[in-house]
């Protein structure tokens, strides 16, 4: 019994230490510092060599959509935005968290590490998950000779305005709520509403089942022997590593399928 209690106390102390370290790390992060005092052990998801930071919707108020805001807005079957779509059974925070954790356990080393002025990004491309996870939405123009694409005005709300400098560094257009183009990240109102805008080519055609997943996370810091990471994006389908956004896919000769026709 004494040994069991000692092991339990050690486990509790380590858990409390991990939480304290995570809070300290977030306080020093320009993007996530507002969450530092809100997180508990439940926000820290064990994922092999990583600890995945999960933020549930509503943490900082009703406008806070949580970790999977982008995923649900762009990659659910209900979304009208061009892009790959997850299966309906993956469109819960629990299921998406499990998917991310499983991928991090499945392949501990990222496909690519990207050092940016805004932090280190860890990227996993085209990982086979062993089962269908959704529908792919891109096709190269060489596969559909004679296709006549039309331009889709793709707009997506920015969830965290602290990410605007990184977004604009990719050459993307940022619009305010009135549709005016932001000329510099420094001109952004921290409390304002902004949107990413991209002109992308679309053609009618069915989306294709896929077993591939792609993940990008931001490296936040070390917690013991593990790396604390937060989600940047996760999506199904074949990925082109050279593309940072939909605009880049268009430059590389890809069309986005509408799922119609």
Image (cartoon, rainbow, N blue to C red):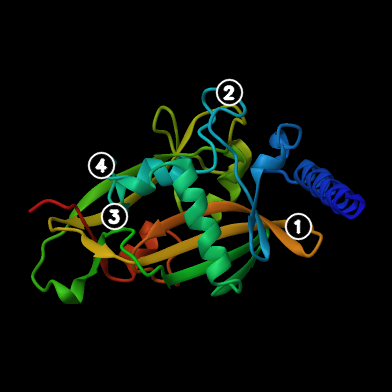
User: In the structure shown, which secondary structural element does the residue marked by tag 1 occupy?
Assistant: strand
Q: Going 87% across and 52% down the picture, which residue do you hit?
A: 10
Does 34 appear above or below 247?
Answer: above
Label 3 belongs to which residue?
200
Of tags 4 and 3, which is closer to the observer? 4
Q: Is residue 176 above or below residue 72?
A: above
Any part of residue 204 in sight? yes
Are the two marked residues, 1 and 3, in contact with CB atoms closer than 8 angstroms? no
Residue at point 59% right, 30% down? Answer: 189
Mark 4–mark 3 distance (CA, rounded to whole Å): 14 Å
Q: Which residue is mark 4?
A: 80
Residue 152 place in picture, x, y as percent: 24, 48
Closer to the camera, 249 or 134?
Answer: 134
Residue sitting nearer the eye, 57 or 253: 57
Secondary structure type for disc 2: loop
Res. 171 visible in picture: no
Q: Indicate which disc residue 196 carries.
A: none
Measured Cα–Cα span from mark 2 to mark 4: 26 Å
Residue underneath mark 1: 221
Q: Which of the two marks, 3 or 2, is nearer to us in this view?
A: 2
Q: Label 2: which residue?
A: 61
Toward which corner of the image does residue 257 lie, by quadrant?
Answer: bottom left
Q: Is residue 198 left or right of residue 28?
A: left
């Amino acid at each position: 019994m004494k040994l069991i209690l000692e092991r339990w106390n050690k486990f509790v102390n380590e858990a409390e230490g991990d939480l304290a370290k995570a809070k300290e790390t977030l306080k020093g992060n320009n993007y996530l510092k507002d969450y530092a005092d809100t997180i508990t052990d439940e926000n820290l998801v064990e994922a092999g060599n990583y600890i995945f930071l999960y933020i549930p919707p509503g943490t900082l108020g009703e406008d806070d959509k949580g970790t999977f805001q982008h995923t649900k807005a762009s990659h659910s079957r209900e979304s009208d935005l061009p892009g790959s779509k997850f299966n309906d059974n993956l469109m819960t925070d629990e299921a998406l968290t499990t998917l991310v954790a499983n991928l991090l356990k499945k392949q501990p080393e990222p496909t690519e590490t990207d050092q940016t002025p805004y932090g280190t990004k860890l990227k996993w491309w085209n990982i086979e998950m062993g089962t269908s996870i959704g529908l792919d939405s891109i096709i190269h123009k060489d596969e559909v000779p004679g296709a006549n694409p039309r331009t889709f005005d793709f707009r997506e709300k920015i969830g965290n305005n602290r990410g605007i400098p990184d977004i604009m560094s990719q050459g993307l257009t940022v619009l305010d709520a009135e549709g005016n183009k932001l000329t510099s990240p420094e001109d952004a109102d921290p409390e304002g509403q902004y949107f990413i805008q991209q002109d992308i080519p679309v053609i009618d055609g069915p989306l294709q089942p896929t077993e591939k997943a792609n993940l990008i996370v931001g490296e936040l810091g070390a917690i013991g022997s593990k790396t604390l990471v937060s989600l940047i994006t996760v999506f199904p389908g074949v990925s082109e590593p050279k593309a940072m956004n939909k605009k880049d896919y268009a430059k590389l000769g890809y069309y986005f399928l509408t799922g119609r026709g």
